[in-house]
């Protein structure tokens, strides 16, 4: 049976589109491992067939001086609308004490919706794919570890190709 096709109550068929979805995970405040473990446990309720990358230590980029981040990526299948999934991600962040005093502030938990299959959304409150992920090694390296052939619907390039395009970038991060 097609994974996007479900049979309900006898003969009725309902088509559900499942999108291979990538969510970036990050934390640089408090017990970073506990925050990310909590996020992964909650993401299992939003995404099926969840795969989680190794975690990596990274230096903060384009923000005020602050502690190093622990980053990773979770990839799974999702049938929800992008806005619904994003609301779920924000609720998970809030449950771990995420505050937003200003852009780039340190955070207990940061969950970014990176890619959702071939879905493209440009809205005041939501952009899918994430507008800056193609420049972020701390997103692309873990993405390549779990979904190297996932395609960016804007560029048409795989995560592996996007990471290779950053090969001249001097920034480096370490898997832990």
Image (cartoon, rainbow, N blue to C red):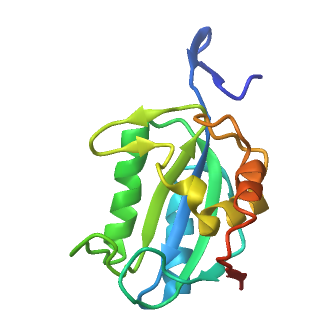
Q: x, y (%) of residue 6?
A: 63, 23
Image height check: is 111 above or below 109?
above
| The furthest residue to the front | 168
Depth check: give the residue in front, 87 or 114: 114
Q: Is residue 134 above or below residue 96?
A: above
**Residue 52 in sight:** no
Residue 60 image offset from top left, x and y in percent: 49, 80
Answer above or below: position of 30 versus 104: below
Q: How many marks?
A: 0
Q: Residue at x 58, y 74 (%)?
A: 71
Residue at image position (57%, 49%) is: 47
Looking at the image, the residue that sits furthest to the top is 11
Q: Is residue 123 visible?
A: yes
Q: Quadrant of the C terminus?
A: bottom right
> Residue drawn 59% across and 53% down?
134
**Image: 153 above or below 136:** above
> The N terminus lies in which quarter of the figure?
top right
Q: Nearer the viewer, residue 147 or 61?
A: 61
* Horizontal side of residue 146 vs 77, given as left or right: right
Residue at the spot 34% in from the left edge and 71% down from the top edge: 95
The residue lying toward the viewer, choosing from 32 and 144, is 144
72 displayed left or right of 36 = right
Q: Position of residue 29 (x, y in %)?
A: 41, 87
Tell me residue 99's x, y (percent): 26, 75
Location of residue 168 (image quadrant):
bottom right
């Amino acid at each position: 049976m097609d994974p996007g096709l479900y049979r309900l109550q006898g003969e009725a068929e309902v088509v559900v589109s499942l999108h291979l979805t990538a969510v970036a995970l990050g934390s640089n405040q408090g017990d970073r491992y506990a925050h990310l473990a909590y996020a992964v446990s909650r993401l299992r309720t939003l995404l099926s067939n969840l795969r989680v990358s190794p975690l990596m230590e990274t230096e903060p980029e384009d923000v005020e001086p602050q502690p190093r981040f622990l980053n990773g990526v979770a990839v799974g299948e999702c049938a929800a609308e992008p806005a619904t999934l994003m609301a779920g991600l924000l609720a998970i962040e809030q449950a771990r004490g995420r505050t937003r005093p200003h852009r780039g502030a340190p955070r207990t938990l940061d969950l970014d919706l990176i890619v959702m299959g071939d879905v493209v959304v440009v809205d005041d409150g939501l952009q899918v794919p994430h507008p800056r992920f193609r420049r972020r090694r701390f997103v692309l390296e873990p993405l390549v570890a779990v979904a190297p052939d996932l395609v960016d619907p804007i560029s048409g390039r795989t995560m592996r190709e996007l990471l290779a395009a950053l090969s001249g970038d001097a920034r480096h991060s370490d898997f832990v």
